[in-house]
Image (spheres, rainbow, N blue to C red):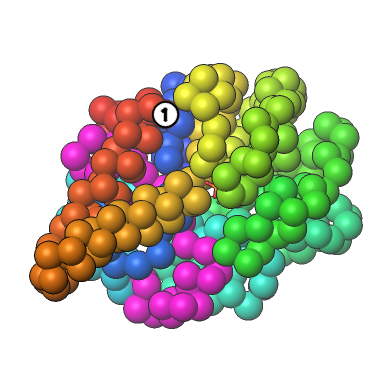
Amino acid sequence: SVVPLREILADAFDKRYGVPAINIFNDLTLEAVLAAAVERRSPLIVQTSVKTVKSIGSDVLYRMWTAMTDGIDVPVTLHLDHCPERAVITECLERGWNSVLFDASRMPVAENTRQTVEVVAEARRHGADVEGEIESITGVEDDIGSDTAAAQQDLAVALDFLRTTGVDVFAPAIGNAHGSYKRAPVLDFQRVSDLVAAHPLPIALHGGSGLSDEQFRDLIGRGCAKVNISTALKETYMKSNLAFLRAAEEKDKWDPPSLFRAVRADVVELAGSLMTLFGSAGRA
Ligand code: 13P
Ligand code: ZN
Ligand code: NA
């Protein structure tokens, strides 16, 4: 069933497993990640970027979501990823999204805090949850962000942000980056432990694509209950299409449903393998 983000994260944080938060971008990827969750008996966080919301439209996107999750028997939730635009936050909350990431990480912390307090109040009126971010995660994700990393804030500043705003999950910069890593990431594992020790709140691990199994396991064990994956799905989707279409050209055979079947199988496999790796498989 469709449940609040905080419900999915509370269990994951408590038992120290990670829930994949996967950025879908069309009907096929949405249907395939939901199918993977049912197949692996896993909770799932479905994310939409602002770009996806604008390309499909929040109305059609939300109708797809309700149609495809109707009667689903594992816990799933719909989340708006990195959103600096208050108007898009309001639009998605009014539509029925379960949670939003208000990304004001380019603003000074004081202004970010002030506006996040407003977003939390707005979300609560809809029974929705909020992810907070005060340090811009390195790299561009669907046109949002920058390749220059924002400075990590002092632990005290981060804790003050968490206590003042009452966000449900926090996205820290720990050497993680959006996109595929150009060189091996050097991660600040201890920062996750320090945050969780001082303020026991689920942590969102951004920039998941490109991290090693060992890095995932370590960070999840420290409290990263929400694990964001975007680039890996885009790559799988595009490469699967490319491989199929090359073969189709070779055979001069053009049957769209068989393309969809092939791509869907690859997306289901990717999502399912993440559920197993993060330990969310078998929890629902
Ligand atoms: P990747 O694109 O590196 O998987 O990062 C995903 C993410 O953090 C989405 O917010
Ligand atoms: Zn991110
Ligand atoms: Na990444």
Q: Find out whether residue 34 is within the magenta segment.
A: yes
Crowding at mark 1 (Cα within 10 Å: few <14, some 14-19, many 20+): many
Secondary structure of the magenta portion, mostly?
Answer: helix
| Magenta part of the chain | 33-62
- In the image, residue 61 lies at what x, y percent? 37, 72
Q: Residue at x 43, y 40 (%)?
A: 20
Q: Check mark 1 vs ligand 1: CB closer than 8 Å? yes or no.
A: no
Q: Residue at x 43, y 37 (%)?
A: 19
- In the image, residue 235 lies at what x, y percent? 43, 52
- In the image, residue 169 lies at what x, y percent? 60, 42
Instruction: Tell me if residue 10 can be seen.
Output: no
Q: The C terminus lies in which quarter of the figure?
A: top left
Please tell me which residue lies in front, 66 or 123. 66
Instruction: Tell me if residue 67 can be seen.
Output: yes
Q: Does residue 211 appear to the left or right of 45 in the view shown?
A: right
Q: Find out whether residue 161 is within the magenta segment.
A: no
Q: Residue at x 42, y 68 (%)?
A: 96
Judging by the rendered image, the residue that carries numbered circle 1 is: 278
- In the image, residue 64 lies at what x, y percent? 29, 70
Q: Residue at x 68, y 52 (%)?
A: 139
Q: Does residue 214 appear to the left or right of 143 in the view shown?
A: left
